[in-house]
Amino acid sequence: MREELLSIIEKNSRIDLKELAIRLGKEEIDIVNELQKLEEERVICGYHTLINWEKTSIEKVTALIEVKVTPQRGKGFDRIAARIYNYPEVRDVYLMSGGFDLLVILEEKSLKDIAMFVSEKLSTLDSIISTGTHFILKKYKDHGTIIDEHIKDEREVIS
Amino acid sequence: MNVPLNETVLSLKPSGIRKFFDLVSEMEDVISLGVGEPDFDTPWHIRDEGIYALEQGKTFYTSNAGLKELREEICNYLKRTQNIEYNPLSEVLVTVGGSEAIDIGLRAMINQGDEVIIPQPAYVSYYPCTLLAGAKPVIIDLKAENDFRLTSGELLNAITEKTKVLILPFPNNPTGAIMEKEDLEKIAKICIEKDIYVMSDEIYSALTYKGKHLSIASIEGMKERTILINGFSKAYAMTGWRLGYACGPSEIIKQMTKIHQFAIMCAPTTSQYAAVEALKNGDDDVRMMRGAYNQRRRFLMNAFKEMNLPCFEPFGAFYVFPCIKEFGMTSEEFATRFLEEEKVAAVPGSAFGDSGEGFLRISYAYSIENLKEAMTRLARFVEKLRNGK
């Protein structure tokens, strides 16, 4: 049930317990217990909402920043990663394979904010060797959801 | 002018589905529960393979029986999923959907005056195809109390000296019924004793929710007397690609291939290349879709329970078949009023044979959101009828 439960709430975390229980053929109490376990184990790390900010009046600029760093003795990349992810404006930090080490995703109100963050905060950290900043121009698909998808049933009504 | 028209064709009644379809298409904003095809798009890697075949200019006929590679993959699939071994060179024919296989299979086996046993409720094409092949359809009315399974008693009662073929449509459209091992073994025993051939339409075989589908062809002594029909429409959400297949004894497949060759030439080439990809790498897609259908099936069964609408629990296809006899209307009247008063389209059970009277076919090839709204309306409608309005 775990896998099926996760695949449902990954797409819709607002689904109510009763419906989950029905769809999975379980009792509500089993679902409650399983969710609690998943949260305790940090398998479920949070319940978020996918928002298309472009449709709001709120300005958001998203940047992907490639960061090369010098790993620290005994701590590898974890310590420098923590120094970066503790900034609240940093949305995601990933350790990467390939041509750079950390991918930092930043969400800010303006280009200027991002420039300020990179030049004044990120670049000045000790172990940072270089950064490369890319801006997102348009989101087509986010978290497996096609942003502008208009679902229309093309099928014949009866067949 | 004397328009030339064939008498048998003239005598065929248009499908009951068609009649209801005409009614529905006149209305706007209808929520439909009426489709017999998946709501999923064909998985992208399968579509991509079709596109790639076109890009490479693979736009010619294939051999009449279908691409050799596809026939081999079909054999691998049947071996892997149902442990039946067919020879791809002589025992497989790729057809234009399962429906072509039904038609030419009957035409290849039947002589004038033979009888074909058709358990109903069932898909609408067996009856007319039997008539067109020159045989006499013998109907078995399956019963709700048997969960719409075919029993040995019912089969024995229908058999005469003229019986040639039994059509075995499980998992069933419209009831969602399945046949399990014990059920099939009893049927197999009779078929062997009475020397009857079976046309087993297993187009919904990938969609079962209580263990794996079992084909009657896998029972000892049955492979040599069974035409197994399957296809890509339901399992891989490929209805529009029009691709199915028949497997069976080489003597019959050989004759079917002749009809196919003269009438069709070969199944669409693009679809055949896409189907190879489906069989090779599509198992995960099927699993995902089956999981989604199963959740919806449970959702509907629970909704019926809450509105006290009797419905046996179906374990196959993507249909549920609730009983509406308590309202004292024919299923056509019920479906028509439901459509007019709540704007929800479901197909009257009577469209699938007389034994479907008193039932409604509800398809769950729809999103949960769609089903939720439809069930809210059904509950309201049922309540209204029970209050005598």
Image: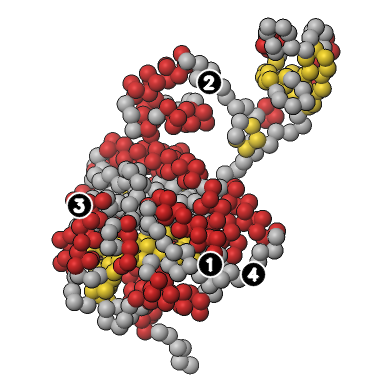
The amino acid sitting under disc 3 is Asn
The amino acid sitting under disc 1 is Gly
Q: Which mark is residue B146?
A: 3
Q: Which mark is residue B342?
A: none
Instruction: Using the rendered image of the protein, determine whether residue B309 is visible from the camera's viewpoint.
Output: yes
| CA distance for labels 3 and 2 | 46 Å
Q: Which residue is located at x 54 percent, y 18 percent?
A: A46
Residue bearing mark 1: B66
**Same chain for marks 1 and 3?**
yes
Q: Is residue B243 left or right of residue B156?
A: right
Q: Which residue is located at x 43 percent, y 40 percent?
A: B291
Q: Which residue is located at x 52 percent, y 28 percent?
A: A10
Q: Chain of mark 2?
A: A
Q: Chain of mark 4?
A: B
| CA distance for labels 1 and 4 | 12 Å
**Same chain for marks 3 and 4?**
yes
Q: Earlier in the sequence, mark 1 or mark 3?
A: 1
The amino acid sitting under disc 2 is Tyr
The amino acid sitting under disc 4 is Phe
Residue bearing mark 4: B60
Local SS, label 4: loop
Q: Is residue B248 left or right of residue A104?
A: left
* Residue mark closest to the camera, 4 vs 2: 4
